[in-house]
Image: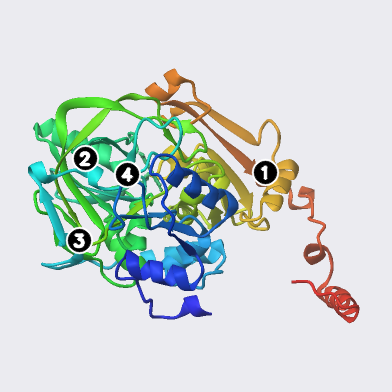
Amino acid sequence: MRWNKVKIMPFQDLREFIGKLEEEKQVVRIAEEVDWNLEVGAITRLCDEAGLPAPFFQKIKGYTDAYRILGEPLSNHKRVAIAMDMEPNSSVKSLIEEYGKRKRMPVKPTRRHDGPCKEYIRKGKEVDLLEFPVPFVHEGDGGRFIGTWHLTICKDVNSGWVNWGMYRHMLHDKNTIGLQAGPPTHVRRILQGWIDKGKPMEIAIVLGAEPVCTMCAAAPIPYGVSEVDIAGGIRGRSVELIKCETVDLEVPATAEIVIEGEVALHEMREEGPFGEYTGYMGGHREQRPVIHVNAVTYRNHPIFTMMNEGMPVTGTHATQSVTRSAECVEMLRALGIPATAAYEHTHGCTLLIVVAIRAGQARADDVAHAIWGSRLGVSTPYVIVVEDDVDPFDLEQVLHAIASKCHPYRGIVRLDRARGHALFPWLSRYEQQHLLGARVYFDCTWPSDWAPEDIPRKCSFESIYPSDVQQKALDVWQRHGFKKD
Ligand SMILES: Cc1cc2nc3c(=O)[nH]c(=O)nc-3n(C[C@H](O)[C@H](O)[C@H](O)COP(=O)(O)O)c2cc1C
Ligand SMILES: [Mn+2]
C-alpha cells in the first residue's frame, strides 16, 4: 500500500499542498467576488456540512485580488491523508496508526536566513491587519476573527522551551488582537510565567504554514515536548524555521502570513463569542488578554487560512480525531494499559472518546482516570471503554456494547467536582466561569469477578461457528453470487 512506503514527500509550503488538493479535486477556486462579512463564512460552513472541496477565494470584496482566502484546508480525513502524503481514501484508523508511528521518530527543525514569509515586512506604524481580508465568520460572533486555522507560538520564559498551539484570535483593530485560551492550554501556563516575571509575553501567529505544522499545533502533546519536532516526524523531514523580526521566536519560513507581537501585561479587552468546536456559539463576551502587534511579514499574494467551526463538527475534528486518538493510545500503552485502539469520534467533538482494551487484561476505571490525568483528558469528560471484540470506530458496535455490556447503574461511573471547561455547552454560565465540571465513564467490559462460564458468549458468525462450517457457509454464499467483505 502507498502509505507504507518508506519515503514521505512532505509539502514545502501551503501552495504545494493546494496544488495536490487540486489534483485530487479537494479544492475549488472561487473566482466571483465574495464578502468577508458572513459570505465567506456561509460558503465555508456549507463546505463542511455538505462534504465539499475546500473553497479557495480569489476575490474578496473591498480587497484587491492580491489577497486570497483558503477555507477548511484540512476539514475532512481525505485532506488530512493528503497532507500526510498518504492515499487520499485511507481509513481514519490507518491515519491514526500512521500518525502514531511517525511521531515516535521526531525530527528537529533546521534554520534558514531567508524565506518567502519575509517578502513583505511591515513594522510599527506600518502594521495594519485590516490589510488582510479577515472574515466575520458567523452571525453573532464578537468580531472579525484573524486566527481560526494557524499556529500560535510562544516560549517558556524560564526554560526557553517553545510551544506551538492553536487558540482563537479575534481582531480588535488594526494592530491589536485577542487571545482565548483556557487553563489546560500550554499558552496559558507560559503566559503566567511571563506575568510572574513582570514582562509582556512575546508571541507569533502564523497563517498558512505547510499543513502538517498546523495540524500538530492543535494536537494534545504534553508540556515540554516540542510540536515542531513532532511535525518534523509526521512530515518525515525537518521543518525549516526563520527568525522573527521583532520577537525572539522562530516561525516556519514558507508561511503565508506571520504576525509578531506581545501580550500586554495588565490589559484586557472584551472578546468573543465565536461559533465553536462543540457546534454551538461559545465563549461568552468577556475580558480576555490582548496582543499588541509589532510587525507583520508575508508572502507575495498572501493566502489567508481559516476554519469555520460549527455543526456538524466534521471540520475541526478531522485533524483532532486523528491526533487525539493516537496520543490517547500512546499514553495508555506507556502506562502499561493494553489499549488496542481508541477513537475520538468527530461528532463527540473532543468531549468523548471510545477506547478498546484487551478483554480481561485492564480495567475501565484505570483507562478513564489515565485519560483524565493527561493533557488530553481535560477536554474529554466522556470515556467509553469497550473490549477488543468491539471496533471503537464502528458506532453501531459501540452502541451495542453500551446497551448489552454496560450495567445501567454500576457500569456508568460519574464524577462530580471534576475540572470543567469554559466551552462545555452543558455547564451553566457560573460553572463555565469557575471551571466546575463533571465526568463519566461507561464500562462496557465484563466484570472481572464473573466466572468465565457466566460471561455471555457473543452469537456472531465468527464467534459461534467452527472454521470449517464458516468456510462452507462462505462457499455456499459465494456460489450464489454474494461475498462477505
Ligand atoms: C480550529 C481550532 C481552534 C481552536 N481554538 C482554540 C481556542 O480558541 N482556545 C483554546 O484554548 N484551544 C483551542 N483549540 C484547541 C487547542 O489548539 C488544543 O488544545 C492544543 O492542544 C493546544 O496546544 P497546547 O497543548 O500546546 O496548549 C483549537 C483547536 C482547533 C483545531
Ligand atoms: Mn504544547
Q: Earlier in the sequence, mark 2 or mark 3?
A: 3
Q: Nearer the viewer, mark 4 or mark 3?
A: 4
Q: Earlier in the sequence, mark 4 or mark 1?
A: 4
What is the C-alpha distance between the residues marked 2 and 3?
Answer: 26 Å
Q: Nearer the viewer, mark 3 or mark 1?
A: 3
What is the C-alpha distance between the residues marked 3 and 1?
Answer: 58 Å
Residue with the mark numbered 3? 117
Q: Is residue 412 above or below residue 209?
A: above
Residue with the mark numbered 4? 134
Question: Mark 4–mark 3 contact, CB under 8 Å?
Answer: no
Residue with the mark numbered 2? 190
The mark tally for this picture is 4
Dot 4 amino acid type = Val
Q: Which mark is residue 407?
A: none
Q: Is residue 141 above or below residue 25?
A: above
Q: Nearer the viewer, mark 4 or mark 1?
A: 4
Where, by quadrant of the figure, is residue 323 drawn? bottom left
Residue 14 location (% of width, % of height): 33, 64
Where, by quadrant of the figure, is residue 113 drawn? bottom left
SS category of the residue bearing label 2: helix
Residue with the mark numbered 1? 447
Answer with left or right where residue 99 lies relative to residue 121: right
Q: Earlier in the sequence, mark 2 or mark 1?
A: 2
What is the C-alpha distance between the residues marked 4 and 2?
Answer: 27 Å
What is the C-alpha distance between the residues marked 4 and 1?
Answer: 55 Å
Question: Mark 2–mark 1 contact, CB under 8 Å?
Answer: no
Disc 4 C-beta below 8 A from ligand 1? no
Q: In the image, what residue occupies the spot 78% across and 71% down?
A: 484
Residue 309 location (% of width, % of height): 46, 43
SS category of the residue bearing label 4: loop
Residue 308 location (% of width, % of height): 45, 45
